[in-house]
Image (cartoon, rainbow, N blue to C red):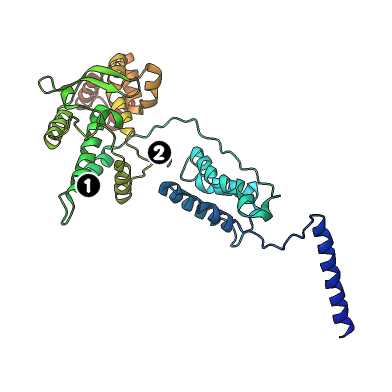
């Protein structure tokens, strides 16, 4: 045995004796462990999800977060700056509330890290920032073009091989959307409408339950189109006491169908997406349209909102504001235009003066 090999053997023998002595006092040498990557940690936590929707969300959030980091990024190197980078990326398409929710999907994995990997027991978790949420109220209005596209697509002719349930499902969703636009009713209110509440003679709904106040609206007059939709739905749902559903509850699959349809039609969709369309926006359409033709008391009764909460649904425009100012000034737009026309016809003003006069009137 050479001196080198003999020295190594003596060193090994000494280490063994030391470990035996330490063991007698309950002291054990910690095994060398491999550093844990963030992907390994997230994958380990992801395996604990049992509900499909939670697993789907976790997969998407984890994938997006890891895409911003180098490959094989170690968990212990995670810093608050990495969360800020993720927030900056997501805030281009979603609001702060959504980003905070997604941080809430990542944080449980970090908190449980020491349970999955003992070597992370002394790891100090990075501080996860909280992204401020905008207090700006939602102002999304469904345009006529968007509504037409949605209704035309959902009411398209039956496709070859299309199942009955799929065909009638999209027909009902189309009726639901159009009826919501004509009444401003919430999803739960539409779902709970009973056939007995429809008065065909008066073309109105009687004692309609309202979700916001949990009180009935005694009388709700219907537009011709809204009444037509109800009459058609009553014919289709002859075996149910409800007009739009079989059990008086909202249809959960409407969300999925609407999301798929909006994607095909290039319509931004989703409450958590900036500028995204949701069914509840139809109530804002209804309230904004009705404010132009009625008083605030009538609008409150039709929407079942107090004067304070009603403001959330009201939108105005430059055209409406100009018209309001003209009414205050008692400006008769028709009379003013006729006067300008007469002066122009009598050649009392030049073409340039005529154009300027019209601009000033409608400006």
Indicate the quadrant where residue 288 lies. top left
Q: Residue at x 32, y 16 (%)?
A: 296
* Image position of 224 with respect to 175: above or below: above
Q: Residue at x 52, y 35 (%)?
A: 133
Q: Is residue 262 visible?
A: yes
* Image position of 325 with respect to 99: above or below: above
Position of residue 187 in the picture relative to residue 67 (left or right): left
Q: Residue at x 55, y 47 (%)?
A: 106
Q: Residue 331 or 185: which is nearer the viewer?
A: 185
Tell me the residue that label 1 is attached to: 153
Question: Seen from this angle, which residue lies furthest front?
Answer: 24
Percent coordinates x, y for residue 96 in the rendering: 51, 39
Percent coordinates x, y for residue 49 in the rendering: 48, 49
Tell me the residue that label 2 is attached to: 271
Indicate the quadrant where residue 4 lies. bottom right
Percent coordinates x, y for residue 184 in the rendering: 28, 28
Q: Residue 141 or 2: which is nearer the viewer?
A: 2
Q: Residue 330 or 24: which is nearer the viewer?
A: 24
Indicate the quadrant where residue 138 lies. top left
Q: Residue at x 50, y 54 (%)?
A: 47
| Real-space CA distance between mark 2 and mark 1, rounded to the nearest whole angstrom | 22 Å
Local packing at callout 1 (Cα closer than 10 Å; few below 14, some 14-19, many 20+) is: some
Look at the image and tell me in which quarter the N terminus lies: bottom right
Local packing at callout 2 (Cα closer than 10 Å; few below 14, some 14-19, many 20+) is: some
Percent coordinates x, y for residue 238 in the rendering: 12, 34
Decide which of tag 2 and tag 1 comes sooner along the chain. 1
């Amino acid at each position: 045995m050479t001196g080198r090999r003999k020295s190594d053997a003596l060193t090994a023998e000494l280490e063994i004796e030391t470990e035996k002595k330490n063991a007698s006092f309950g002291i054990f040498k910690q095994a060398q462990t491999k550093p844990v990557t963030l992907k390994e940690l997230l994958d380990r936590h992801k395996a604990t999800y049992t509900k499909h929707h939670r697993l789907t969300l976790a997969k998407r959030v984890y994938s997006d977060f890891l895409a911003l980091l180098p490959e094989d990024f170690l968990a212990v190197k995670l810093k608050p700056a990495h969360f800020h980078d993720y927030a900056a990326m997501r805030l281009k398409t979603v609001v702060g509330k959504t980003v905070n929710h997604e941080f809430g999907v990542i944080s449980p994995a970090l908190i449980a890290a020491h349970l999955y990997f003992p070597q992370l027991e002394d790891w100090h978790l990075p501080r996860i920032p909280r992204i401020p949420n905008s207090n700006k109220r939602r102002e999304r209005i469904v345009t006529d073009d968007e509504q037409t596209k949605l209704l035309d697509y959902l009411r398209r002719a039956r496709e070859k091989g299309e199942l009955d349930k799929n065909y009638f499902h999209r027909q009902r969703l189309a009726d639901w959307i159009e009826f919501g636009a004509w009444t401003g009713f919430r999803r739960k209110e539409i779902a709970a409408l009973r056939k007995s509440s429809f008065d065909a003679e008066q073309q109105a709904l009687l004692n309609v339950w309202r979700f916001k106040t949990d009180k009935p609206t005694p009388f709700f007059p219907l537009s011709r189109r809204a009444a037509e939709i109800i009459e058609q739905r009553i014919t289709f749902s002859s075996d149910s006491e409800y007009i739009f559903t079989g059990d008086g509850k909202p249809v959960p699959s409407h969300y999925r169908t609407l999301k798929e349809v909006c994607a095909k039609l290039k319509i931004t969709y989703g409450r958590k997406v900036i500028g995204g369309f949701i069914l509840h926006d139809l109530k804002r359409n209804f309230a904004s349209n009705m404010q132009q033709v009625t008083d605030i008391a009538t609008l409150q009764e039709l929407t079942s909102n107090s004067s304070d909460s009603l403001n959330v649904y009201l939108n105005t425009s430059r055209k409406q504001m100009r018209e309001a100012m003209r009414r205050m000034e008692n400006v008769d737009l028709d009379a003013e235009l006729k006067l300008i026309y007469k002066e122009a016809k009598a050649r009392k003003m030049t073409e340039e003066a005529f154009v300027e006069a019209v601009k000033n009137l409608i400006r």
